[in-house]
Amino acid sequence: MTDNTDPRTEYLRRIEERRTESAQQFQRFRKVGFVRLALLGIGLILLWRVFAGLSAWWLVLPAVLFVVLGRVQARISAARLRCERGARLYEQGLVRLDDRWAGTGATGDRFLDPEHPCARDLDLFGRGSLFELLSTGRTDVGEETLAQWLLTPADLTVVRARQEAVTELRPKLDLREELALLGEGAPSGESARGLAAWANSPYWNISPWTRPIAIVISLLTIATLLLWFAGYSPIPFLLVLIIRQVYLYRLQKPVERVISEVDGPSNNLSLLSDVLKRLENERYESALLRELRAALDVDDSPPSKQIARLNRLIELLDSRRNIIFAPAAAILLWPLQCAISIERWRQSSGPVVGRWLAAVGEFEALNSFASYAYEHPHDPFPELLDSGDAHFEAISMGHPLIPARRNVRTDLSLTGDLRVLIVSGSNMSGKSTLLRSVGINVVLALAGAPVRAGSLRLTPVQVGAAIRIQDSLQAGASRFYAEITRLRQVVGLTEDERPVLFLLDEILHGTNSHDRQIGAEKVVHGLIDRGAIGLITTHDLALARIVDELAPRAANVHFEDQFQDGQMRFDYLLRPGVVQRSNALELMRSVGLEV
């Protein structure tokens, strides 16, 4: 498959392949089922003959074949289920291509920081958010990495390395399918973070004699118990029990700590091992992917095997709860033996667990970008400018969360002397959407993903936005106070070395026109004097006069509307100059208000 393959055509082809294979597996399952049914019938007949004097050995072969074929059926059923999941995976891809994805994926609500300067304003998280559109990760550490990339703009070298990696991963549909199907249905949540914290928590200083003594006590327990059963005195057995309890009492606290602390990290270990194994087997060309692959390597064995070994140790520990094995576990000091093995695993492999998890998280985040890039082949990577003043130049820019059929593209430039655009226009004409389009494309660009534009050239910036400002009853703060608090935060961003791109919607509209004009002019003047660039929207046409004071560093642009046949019609095209009319009165009359 080439990078030029149409994603819809490829998804439809793969859906058909998976469904066909699923149907074939179902037919195999039925055929094996008929054979097992026949064996069951034969077994019942033979059983009846056994009661009539036939040797019971005649039952062995049908019974063995029945069990073996049962395992064959289980493998066929698993293969069929995998095909069905594969088909659903590509059906979800079609849902994204059809712009019906909102509400179908992970929303990332837990990553939304209300204090972040643009996350809420740009719909980075939540239902129908950028995170939901992008995220295809199977592990919680992959989701966390993607979220951090969206929240924190990367350096140029990092962005370019991610672009190269995404370009390499873009056509690897098979890899994404295998990763997506690994451990389907496994729980996620806090397991990866818990595993990393557990791996680096203070160690139990195990004496080299702890295990040998435990083995000797277990052997003495078995020997004296057998002697008692053979008719000898029970006193040796009782003495060993006393020694055993004294020994266990001395080790009770560290053993209980190991057992209790490993419970949380044990979740999802099987999935993590499978993901690591798949990534270990892949070979890469780009520098970042090679670096991530190298981070998985360790001296003695691959991390997938080490994680799998930890998983087996935890399963052995849990076997002590089995009612059949419990007596033997008590005799063999099973919890102590398992706790020692788990703790030694932690002491040998724990220091590199964080490195493994970080590599898995980056792989999954890059795969999320690669999936988006594959499904949007016309979205290019931005051109990143190394130095100079803040620069933003977009041709045919759209909003990635708006369906393509309704996505009106815009050319926008903040370059050279021009530092700020004052955007005027009527209600619902597209002012806020323009701000969000600029901001969300910058987030994509500086995370290392393609952007929704014909082309985009920009310098590294940090986005500060005041678009979705709300009052707070709990904090006793009005909307105006919430807005000026955010404005202070945006201005504060200019203290960092990276320039600011500010996006201010209806600036200071909670106060009177006189104060609004003076305040807005001072805020904007201060921002651009500190090297920032940005856009401001307003209904108050008096604010358009800010351009007179700031020219040539500021310019007016606007959106228009037409009121036809009782309806407002918008073309969402950005035009130079100040809007000449408002639709407020027409809208009020259209809903029946007498104005």
Image (cartoon, rainbow, N blue to C red):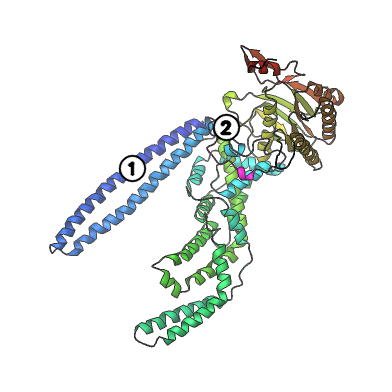
Q: Amino acid at mark 2?
A: His
Q: What range of the chain is rendered magenta?
A: 98-123
Residue 52 in the image, given as x and y percentages of width and height: 12, 62
Q: Amino acid at mark 1?
A: Phe
Q: Chief secondary structure of the magenta span?
A: loop
Relative to 70, 375 lies left or right:
right
User: Is residue 196 visible to us here?
Assistant: yes
Give the residue number, with chain letter if any, for mark 2: 376
Q: Per the image, is 115 magenta?
A: yes
Which element carries disc 2, helix, strand or loop?
Answer: loop
Query: Residue 235 or 404: which is nearer the viewer?
Result: 235
Q: Nearer the viewer, mark 2 or mark 1?
A: 1
Residue at image position (78%, 34%) is: 390
Instruction: Give the vertical position of 332 relative to 428 (above or below).
Output: below
Query: Residue 371 or 320: which is nearer the viewer?
Result: 320
Relative to 226, 562 lies left or right:
right
Q: Which mark is residue 555?
A: none
Residue at image position (55%, 68%) is: 256
Q: Which mark is residue 26?
A: 1
Query: For residue 203, which quarter of the picture?
Result: bottom right
Query: Residue 403 or 537: which is nearer the viewer?
Result: 537
Residue at image position (80%, 23%) is: 555
Q: Per the image, is 406 magenta?
A: no
Relative to 9, 429 lies left or right:
right
| CA distance separating discs 2 and 1 | 35 Å
Whichever of callouts 2 and 1 sits on the residue coming sooner in the sequence is 1
Across the whole image, how many numbered discs are drawn on residues?
2
Residue 366 in the image, given as x and y percentages of width and height: 60, 43
Crowdedness near tag 1: few (<14), some (14–19) or many (≥20) residues, C-alpha within 10 Å: some
Instruction: Give the vertical position of 188 relative to 232 (above or below).
Output: above
